[in-house]
Image (tube, helix red, strand yellow):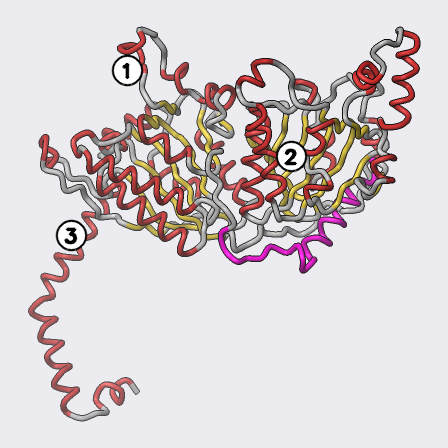
Amino acid sequence: MIRTILFGQGSRNAERLKVVFQRRGTSGSTTQALEQQTRDARQAALLGGGEERISKQHSKGKLTARERLAALLDAGSFNEIGTFVQHRTHDFGMEEYMYYGDGVVTGSGTIFGRDVFVASQDFTVFGGSVGEMHARKMSHLMQRAIKVGAPLISLIDSSGARIQEGVRSLAGYADIFQQNVDASGVVPQISLILGPCAGGAVYSPALTDFVFMVENSSYMFLTGPDVVESVTGEKVTKEELGGSTVHTVTSGVAHGSYKHELDALAAMRQLLTYLPSSCNDTSPRLAQIDPIDRDIPYLDACIPESDTASYDMHDIIEPLVDGSEFFEIHARYAPNIIVGFARMGGISIGIVANQPNHLAGCLDIDASVKAARFVRFCDAFNIPLLTLCDVPGFLPGTSQEADGIISHGAKLLYAYAEASVPKISLIVRKAYGGAYVVMSSKNLRTDVNLAWSTGKIAVMGSASAARILHPRDDAKALEQRIKEYDDAFNNPFQAAKDGFIDDIIAPRDSRKRICRELDRLMNSNNKQPTMSGKKHGCGPI
């Protein structure tokens, strides 16, 4: 059969075949030499900056760029892009140091069988510094991620701009930043800081959706300790200036931190399971292992008798969600509000909840910005929102007013009002004043608004209301006024009568009701994500 295909068209094909065989005979040695050269170059690329520098990386307790990818991706799934790229700089003796890959390993692979694009900076090559070709590799990768519609994960371990390349390095950074903005709201972007991230390099992770760090080995700062000391006279360590504690607790630049690199990489794999591949998809829906009709008797008694008593909102969240698994975001920053991902009935959801254990659950500047950015991410990527409300109001004080609580609080209001994904709200205790309005109230087009019988929906607390309404009453009369206000407003019934609450439910039935409403909304034609492309970006607000 093969002979028929090759020679079926007569002697002309036979002559062509002879020429091919003759060429192979004369160039076989050349081909073998090129193949050997390719193998040698690939082996050199695998070694990065060489065995000595790899040993130094290991001595610091850090993995290499390729070891990190091996831990992050499904086994055998990585397909490298740009293996043989080299810099083309001849200043400052750079031509003597020509490393394949130019300090970053880029390519695609899978996580739990789903496509992702990855870039892993190699500190053993020029300290992971970003030059023209390094940046070009990353920009090309990001373009492919956008085109394919797959998440982008950057493993950052870089000393910053490559000084020897001058403005070409800075231009490369600008290209990367532009791609970050283009990808925002199109594909999820995750940055994992696994070493230094200094100077202008910090703006790429700042433009991504999530930033995570490793304790005592990753740092982010615009100007390092030496520059700070020379300009201000202040002596500060890298950890004090830009370590994981600074950015997960104080600045909010990072969304979480882990003790070891392997822990961080495993967490990134878990996070991806809650997210869709792009704005044109929904998150994977898992099989229902945890029954949706599971009663939770504990919830019937979880709210304290006293209005001023605190409790931990995690104790409500965890029993509600599938398998009590909650992937919290920004856990240590602005702890008066909780945000994170979970599943209910197998459906991936974003949860926003006030935390009475901190500032009584009041909304302040940091909490408003934290929650607003999370809500906008969920909306951009078709993730339904569940809001658990126990909020006495916005945090009062001159510092909050002077620092712009009005405009920052409006960010959360705007985010909820803009969101077109399915929205469910459950009021478990207080819902006072403007903070009630902001926290996914009915008039912000929330689909389902529920309350427990412990819910208190009013302009303000009873004591404050009574003092304003009856300023001249003595203590005994004021006590009666407080009771009257309590009976009239500090319950969910008036709001339910007026149609602002859809139902008052028993706490033990909350999971059952929310799962059913969520399933109905996700299957409803008028609430199904439009899949018409990018809604909006998710940049820092």
Q: Is residue 514 part of the magenta span, yes or no?
A: yes
Q: Is residue 277 visible?
A: no
The earlier-in-sequence mark between 1 and 2 is 1
What is the span of residues highlighted in magenta in the rendered image?
507-534
* Residue identifier under label 3: 37
Find the distance from the CA under tag 3 to the CA under tag 2.
56 Å
Alpha-carbon span between mark 1 and mark 2: 40 Å
Residue at point 21%, 92% (across, down): 9
Residue 378 lies in the magenta-colored region: no
Q: Which residue is mark 2?
A: 352
Q: Are marks 3 and 1 in contact (CB under 8 Å)?
A: no
Q: Residue at x 42, y 36 (%)?
A: 207
Kind of residue indicated by mark 1: Val
Mark number, residue 227: 1
Percent x, y for residue 209?
A: 48, 38
Apparent side of residue 235 relative to residue 361 in the rendered image (left or right)? left
